[in-house]
Amino acid sequence: MINTPELLFGLTQWLSLFFHFLSLSLLSIGGAIATAPEMHRFLVTEQHWLSDAQFNASIAIAQAAPGPNVLFVALLGWNVGLNTGSIVAPYLGLSLSLLGSLLPSTVLTYVAAQWCYSNREKLAVRAFKQGMAPLVVALLIATGWILASSNSSAAKTTFQDWPLWLLTVTTSLVLWQTRIHLLWLLGAGALLGWFGWV
């Protein structure tokens, strides 16, 4: 059972949702999943528009579903709309979050890709690409940390959640060292969760 906040949404809140995803769009280097920590801070911690469980479920469902992983952004907006209790609001939340997330990055990517390709031999372009790599890796690690740590109940300490952390580390190592498809690992995690082992 997922505890859901009950929200009263007006134009200000919808605009805030749209502009927040609009601003995050330009930070999503390496994929929208890299901005998940900031989305969690805004939607769960600061605004209380989503619960931790809803946030995690949105990402897990989108990652397990076929298609681009940016679908989790649409699910976040959908769940925010659901929490208002309106029939129309989930569609509005989905549209605003997805449009805000895709519009700036799509335009920038199109323009920048053309410019970078025509200037690919310049030292500044090569240095920029190499400098962005550690930033993207750090953002992905932060995403994993938030997803794993927000699963713990208040009564559990990090030490008591050792099976979850062991699974997190093992999955990371398997992904890093092998070419196994991500869906196998998601399925294994789902089974372990179903049996109550993590």
Image (cartoon, grey):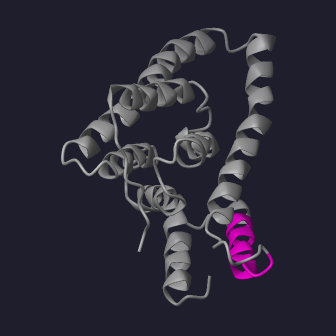
Q: Main secondary structure of the magenta part?
A: helix
Side (left or right) of 81 relative to 113: left
Q: Can you give x and y, in whole percent of width and height, for residue 85 in the image?
A: 26, 52
Q: Answer yes or no: is residue 101 visible.
A: no
- In the rendered structure, the answer to whether residue 156 lies left or right of residue 30 reads right
Q: Position of residue 59 (x, y in %)?
A: 49, 55
- Which residue is rendered at x = 74% and y = 67% of the image? 173
Q: Residue at x 59, y 42 (%)?
A: 46
Q: Is 76 drawn above or below residue 146 in the view shown?
A: above
Q: Nearer the viewer, residue 51 or 25?
A: 51
Question: In x, y percent, where is residue 167?
Answer: 68, 75
Is residue 174 found left or right of 18 in the rendered image? Answer: right
What residue span does the magenta drawing correspond to?
159-174
- Where in the figure is residue 177, as x and y percent of width and height? 73, 64
Q: Compared to 13, does 52 lie above or below? A: below
**The N terminus lies in which quarter of the figure?**
bottom left
| Residue at x 48% of width, y 31% of height | 21
> Looking at this view, is 194 or 67 the one in front?
194
Quadrant of the image occupied by residue 155:
bottom right
Instruction: Give the number of callouts.
Output: 0
Q: Residue furthest left?
A: 87
Is residue 13 shown left or right of residue 164?
left
Q: Nearer the viewer, residue 49 or 187?
A: 49
Q: Is residue 169 magenta?
A: yes
Q: Compared to 144, does 108 lie above or below? A: above
Observer able to see residue 18 = yes
Q: Confirm whether the magenta stretch covers residue 94.
A: no
Image quadrant containing the C terminus: bottom right
Residue in view at x 58 percent, y 45 percent = 36
Q: In front here: 127 or 142?
A: 142
